[in-house]
Amino acid sequence: MCRELSLTARDLVRRIASDAGQSYSEIARRVNQDMAKGKNLLSAVHEIARENGLDPGRYTLDPEKIAEEIRTILRKDYAQTLMISAVLAQMVESRGRDSLSPPAFFTFMEFLADATAAPKRREKRIGNVEEATTKIIELTTTLVSVICDWSRTGIVGVAESCPEPLRGLARVILRKTRLYQAGMWTCISCGKIVSIRETRALLCKECDARLPGPTTLKRTPPKRERHRTGYGRTVPGDTID
Ligand SMILES: [Zn+2]
């Protein structure tokens, strides 16, 4: 039965394409088109299942399992988590092809706040950072697509089907995305809300000025908890180092 369980949109699309005897790119294109029209990921996939005589119930995503997988990866190796967060911070700033969507990044940041509060177990072996980064991108992108309601313009609300433990997270992502659409950014270090034009490498001017050295690469990820997320062990307030 393990085969029945997908944790990412990519895996789900791959599975239904294979069961329907169609190519991955064909199904992916169709799902993207439906989502661009404001349909949610699962409804798009379920319609394809029905059209192909497949049982829609077999193509589901469990948000809580996805969240658990994100936590597991981020807690596994602290050094690796710092590297992932540096890569993602660059991707969300980039306007190019390998950019990361702000809602997915906001999702990541909430889990990161949770993970940094955990004991820093050091593992001898550093895993494959690139692989872990790709997995985190897929998981956060998938999670935000199922716990939030989307329209053509982006996130419009918390999905009705969003499980209770993740509703706080969905609300934070919704709020930050709305701010972002209004040209505002939440500083990833101190949590202050500033105009996007005034940010430097995802930080407010003050936090940026406090950092020594060159302003873009090799920036350490946030060292502060920001606020309670409502779903995890995050403690609001103090610096943690
Ligand atoms: Zn700041």
Image: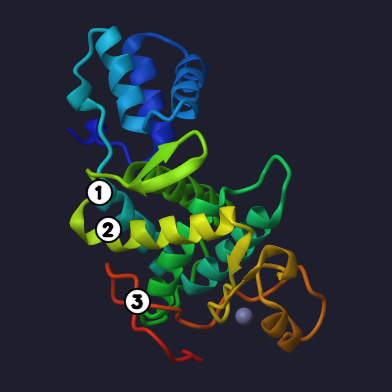
Residue 110 x/y as whole percent: 42, 66
Disc 1 residue type (three-letter): Cys
Q: Are marks 2 and 1 in contact (CB under 8 Å)?
A: yes
Q: Earlier in the sequence, mark 3 or mark 1?
A: 1
Numbered circle sitting on residue 162 = 1
Q: Does residue 213 lie above or below 71 as drawn?
A: below
Q: Give the class, few, some or many, for how many residues have Cα within 10 Å of label 3's Cα (few <14, many ≥20).
A: some
Q: Please, which residue is most extreme toward the right here?
A: 214
Inter-mark Cα distance, 2 to 1: 7 Å
Residue at disc 2, secondary structure: helix
Residue at horizontal 37 percent and vertical 84 percent from the top: 236
User: In this image, 82 relative to 56: left or right?
Assistant: right
Where residue 76 sits, quadrant-wise, is bottom left
**Disc 2 residue type?**
Leu
In the image, 97 versus 23, the foreground residue is: 97
Label 3 amino acid? Arg
Q: Which residue is tagged 2?
A: 166
Task: Tell me the SS state at disc 3.
Answer: loop
Give 96 or 241, whichever is nearer the viewer: 96
Q: Which residue is mark 3?
A: 228
Instruction: Give how far apart the Cα atoms at labels 2 and 3 are.
Output: 13 Å
